[in-house]
Amino acid sequence: MKNIAIFTLTSELHDEQAVSAMTNEFLGSLGFDYDYPASDYTDYGQHALDLIYVRTGGTEGIFRRLLPDLLKQSGRPFYLLTSGKSNSLAASLEILSFLRQQGYQGEVIHGNREYVNQRILLLEQAGEARQRLKGCRLGIVGQPSDWLISSQADANVVRRRLGIELVDIPMQELLETIAQTPQQPASEQAPTAAIADALPGAEQIYQALKVLVQRYQLQGLTLRCFDLLTAVHNTGCLALAKLNSEGIVAGCEGDVPTMLSMAVVNALLGVSGFQANPANIDPTKGEMLFAHCTIPFNMVEHFEYDTHFESGIGVGIRGYVKEGPVTIFKVSGDLSRHFVAEGLLVRCQAKPDLCRTQLVIQLADPAAASYFLTHPIGNHHVILPGHHQALLEEVLRA
């Protein structure tokens, strides 16, 4: 089955031979692969992108009769493709207006060939990401850290909107799994004796988390990592860096909304993104400093080991990311809000009085900095390489 399907709406008043010739010309000009015709709507909602091709005018009543069945088959927005010929654009606008009146989302896809192709390919990418998220299982190992007083999630909304299942895993289970996991000598070079001593324990935490991933069939997790500082006198920073680089979403501090944000990013781009908190904001210039003690290894050009910043123990990661375009992203735990802003990573730094990985980002729109100071979605945000605002907005479209 192809990722894009085109279903049709045609008035019986129009001559089918003329409409078919017009259809062949229009669809033949499009630069993507698709299933067509799919006129009986039996598998509507089963593709990454389902397009309703309004071929003629006079189709509004036909759509209205179809709508109850289409709603049962798909909860996504309706995408109405039209060439504009035979009054098809007028009919599409009437249908979209009707959908909006009923409280449903939709869009008319119409314009020159380049616009139509780009728009459809972006919608396909977003649809593929939604398919990858559906059925995803994400673990919450321990509860969110005590200071994350706004970073909860509504499991029912997450399941309904994204198809993601949240799985609660007691912290004690991880600690028992760590105790049952043999330590191995570290193979990596360490800059200090203290870090060399900590590396086997950090690797042990990684191996224990891998056991939980298998046990619960997880595609990702968030870890109440600060509990490890007292329980095993080590950190989860190395484990999370490794898991993320292996395609397993892995977040810090039990922050569920940030884990969800990372899962969306991973489904779109195959990289989890850098979970970090703003450490400094210049609201006049739109320049921001983000920092944290772990970063996915597949996001960095190179990295160094250090201690964990707050505690001065264990293993922290100082990663150096290639300068260039980045996107900052966050969803709320009930998925009612999200933030997306594009910018440029202008430099990495290594100041000793901050979490170890430090990225300085210049926002494309300096005014976007006001969001952080007036209505932020928690403190942690996700930094990902490249500019992807339009794609992220589309994935989260209700």
Image (cartoon, rainbow, N blue to C red):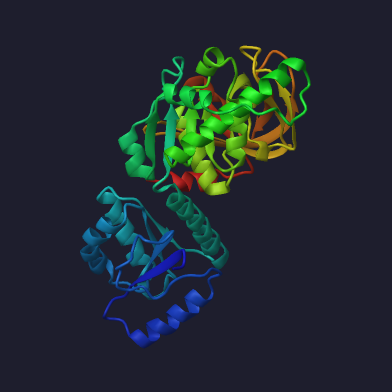
Q: Is residue 186 above or below residue 78?
A: above
Q: Nearer the viewer, residue 177 or 233?
A: 177
Q: Is residue 197 left or right of residue 106?
A: right
Q: Is residue 104 above or below residue 121?
A: above
Q: Is residue 57 left or right of residue 371?
A: left
Q: Is residue 275 visible?
A: no
Q: Percent position (x, y) of residue 292?
A: 62, 23
Q: Percent position (x, y) of residue 45?
A: 35, 60
Q: Is residue 301 left or right of residue 241?
A: right
Residue at figure coordinates x 58%, y 25% from the top left: 236
Q: Is residue 278 left or right of residue 72?
A: right
Q: Nearer the viewer, residue 358 or 288?
A: 358
Corner quadrant of residue 365: top right
Q: Is residue 78 above or below residue 6?
A: above
Corner quadrant of residue 69: bottom left
Q: Give the number of marks.
A: 0
Q: Percent position (x, y) of residue 196?
A: 73, 21
- Quadrant of the frame with the N terminus: bottom left
Residue at figure coordinates x 48%, y 42% from the top left: 219
Q: Percent position (x, y) of residue 53?
A: 39, 69
Residue at figure coordinates x 67%, y 16% from the top left: 354
Residue at figure coordinates x 43%, y 34% from the top left: 139
Q: Is residue 189 visible?
A: yes
- Quadrant of the frame with the C terminus: top left
Q: Of all residues shown, which one is farthest toward the bottom?
A: 17
